[in-house]
Image: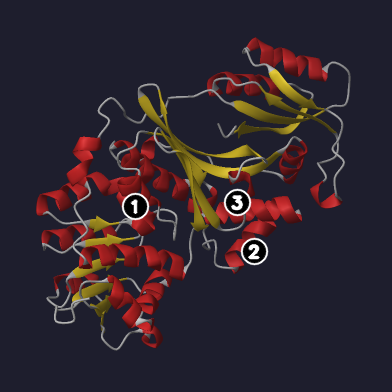
Amino acid sequence: MNNSAPPLKLGICGLGTVASGLIELVTRDVSRVAECASRPLAITRIASRTPRPSIMPDSAEFIEDPFALIGDTEVDVVVELIGGVEPARSLIERALELGKPVVTANKEVLARHGDALFSLARARGLPIGFEASVGGGIPIIKALRESLGGDAISRIVGIVNGTTNFILSRMNEDGASFEDALAEAKSLGYAEAVPDYDIEGLDAAHKIAILASLAWGIPFDVEGVRTQGIVGIRLDDLAFAERLGYFVRHLGLAQRVEACIETQVFPALVPRSTLLAHVRGVTNAVQVTSHAVGSSLFIGPGAGALPTANSVLSDVLDIANNRAVPWDAGRAQRQDRNAGTDADSQSSSAYYLRAQVDDKTGVLARVTELLAGQGVGIDALLQPEIEAAPSKAPAAGASIVMITHKTAESNMREAVACIQAMPEIHGQVSLIRVFDGD
């Protein structure tokens, strides 16, 4: 560090979990941070609706209005940690207009307005640091931008939402109901009071839209991410899946399918032989498949004050060390001009199907006939009730459980609609994609 250099003055918008972690990292071990920076770091302004004097550093002045913070001459870099779309989008835009670099952890504002914001940043010659927007403490953004920047990526798949992974882990390992696992996630601070963004898959969709844009240079398109949450997953599905050699995980996927990029978020049966199947709790993991390197797995804490704040700090250090450049500067060269997201693109997949049926002759034959009518073959079949601990026991009544051969989703859903209409079917037919890991 150059002790004679003026400090890089940080203004933080927001005073929540990640902001508190950043304050701790910057102020707790000043000498260690100084070794990583070419100039000192100083938190000079913090804006929030609610003051928290106990964590305010001595160097910082509290401001209620975040727009006033951005315009303050005592702020060189704006760190946006408010979340949501507004006022975050307007704050980032204003900071760039004033010539100030931005660091943000906000996946939603980037997934929805990233193209406009990065275009503005490029026009001003300014960086937007966003390592913390995906994967918490996992350095997946830098890996895609830098380490794998020259490689041809074919697929990105992973567990990118800790809340849903925690819920499925508790259901699978301890037999907790979905409702009980969700309540526990809330009590531990892993889920919001209104958890729809997590359990409906929207949070993961924002992250997949960002990763797809990074990997292939395509526009941010969160609306093009076909999204399914975990609300319909039942304990008996997890029990049958385990009997068949799988764990259920909630995955985000971006992959090349011929001339387009397919982006999806969905629950899936993942083979127990794969590393992704054994990612537990709130941990995140992202697997990248590329031409030169092959398969790379990035795994670590997907949330939390210090892990996420560390990603924020890494972006701040890049700015302090003049390593940060406008992301779009290299995007035009990397852009795959033949690619684009396609919400209707459907790669083939195997599927898990479970139906609760009348225990009488001919029902199984009718189900297989309806599947065959859509060209769907059967790879594995379970009909006897599973022998499991009471906490994992399937619902009463006869069950038909099967894994199909690979088929188009449209064919599978047409077949399931016909099966659902059978008078011998009770309750909702469960349909879950099988991720083969290849």
Q: Amino acid at mark 3?
A: Val
| Residue 125, above or below 67 | above
From mark 3 to mark 2, how far is it between C-alphas?
19 Å
Q: Position of residue 182 (x, y in %)?
A: 62, 58
- Residue at horizontal 32 percent and vertical 85 percent from the top: 57
Q: Residues within 10 Å of mark 3 (few under 14, many from 20)?
A: some
From mark 2 to mark 1, how far is it between C-alphas?
33 Å
Q: Answer with mark 3 or mark 2, whichever residue precedes in sequence.
A: 2
The colour style of the image is: secondary structure
Residue 218: quadrant of the picture: top left
Q: What's the mark number on residue 127?
A: none
Q: Position of residue 401 (x, y in %)?
A: 76, 29
Q: Position of residue 227 (x, y in %)?
A: 48, 39
- Residue at horizontal 10 percent and vertical 54 percent from the top: 124
Q: Secondary structure at mark 2?
A: helix
- Residue at horizontal 74 percent and vertical 30 percent from the top: 355
Side of 120 relative to 187 (left or right): left
Q: Answer with mark 3 or mark 1, whichever residue precedes in sequence.
A: 1
- Residue at horizontal 73 percent and vertical 53 percent from the top: 173
State the residue position of label 1. Answer: 142
Q: Is residue 312 visible?
A: yes
Q: Secondary structure at mark 3?
A: loop
Q: What's the mark number on residue 279?
A: 3
Side of 255 relative to 239 (left or right): left
State the residue position of label 2. Answer: 184
